[in-house]
Image (cartoon, rainbow, N blue to C red):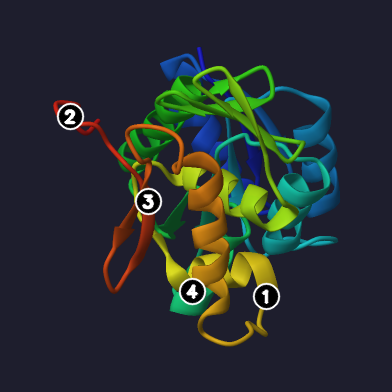
Amino acid sequence: MTRLLIIEDNPELVANLYDFFEPLGYVLDDARDGVTGLRLATQNNYDAILLDLMLPRMDGMTLCSKLRCDYQNPVPVLMLTARDPVDDRVQGFALGADDYLIKPFSLRELDARIQALVRRAQGRQVQGTLKWEDLVVDASAPQAWRQGKIINLTPSTHKLLLCLMRSAPDVVKKHEMEYLLWGDEPPESGALRTHIHDLRQRIDKNFTPALIETVHGIGFRLHKPCGVSEE
């Protein structure tokens, strides 16, 4: 049974989602504006959130940012939008969205994407922490544990590590990481490299295997051990 929050102001689309998902066993809540959606998202426990970008009272980007930054809530978020600018998608992922679907969309595809996000989150998240292999990260405080040893993080390395954990094993692009740390005004080109080096020193230097992998020309991801197949 999957508990799903729908934050969408189009009543016809919301009705279609109820008609499709309830017979599949989903438990649904919905909000028609961003303020109500954020309140429900922070007061209840959901397995995933469907989030429209163009909402009254608070837009989807702002809601996602508040959910991640102000409330440190790691619930999977799938953004729904009628727009398809690359900048929108980049900004959404940088603010903590887990997936992105363009309207109109197939309800069967939406169901498959939700279930994939839920499976991934259930494999990583335990009582306010995120887990990947032998690395456990506190979702709300800048600290982690690996092989029984505590690792202190800076605010920046904590943000980057949470981003990598939530996306694992997928690649996080460099410009997404830069937006996460500095918004629309990133500093000189070597600044991100410095933070990644700092993060590697903290979580990889004294441990085997190294978890942070560089995907040259694209970005970074957490190492996927050999022999583990993709979902």
Q: Amino acid type of disc 1?
A: Gly
Image coordinates for residue 146, horizontal then vertical, percent: 52, 26
- Closer to the observer: label 3 or label 1? 3
Pointer 4 or 2: first along the chain: 4
Residue denoted by label 4 = 175
Label 3 SS: strand
Up the image or down, 1 lies above or below 162; here it is above
Rendered image: mark on residue 221: 3
* Residue 78 shows in this picture: no
Rendered image: mark on residue 183: 1
Alpha carbon separation for disc pair 3 and 1: 21 Å
Image coordinates for residue 33, horizontal then vertical, percent: 78, 52
Rendered image: mark on residue 127: none
Pointer 3 or 1: first along the chain: 1
* Residue 118 shows in this picture: yes
Q: Residue at point 63% right, 53% down?
A: 157
Q: Nearer the viewer, residue 92 or 27?
A: 92
Alpha carbon separation for disc pair 2 and 1: 34 Å
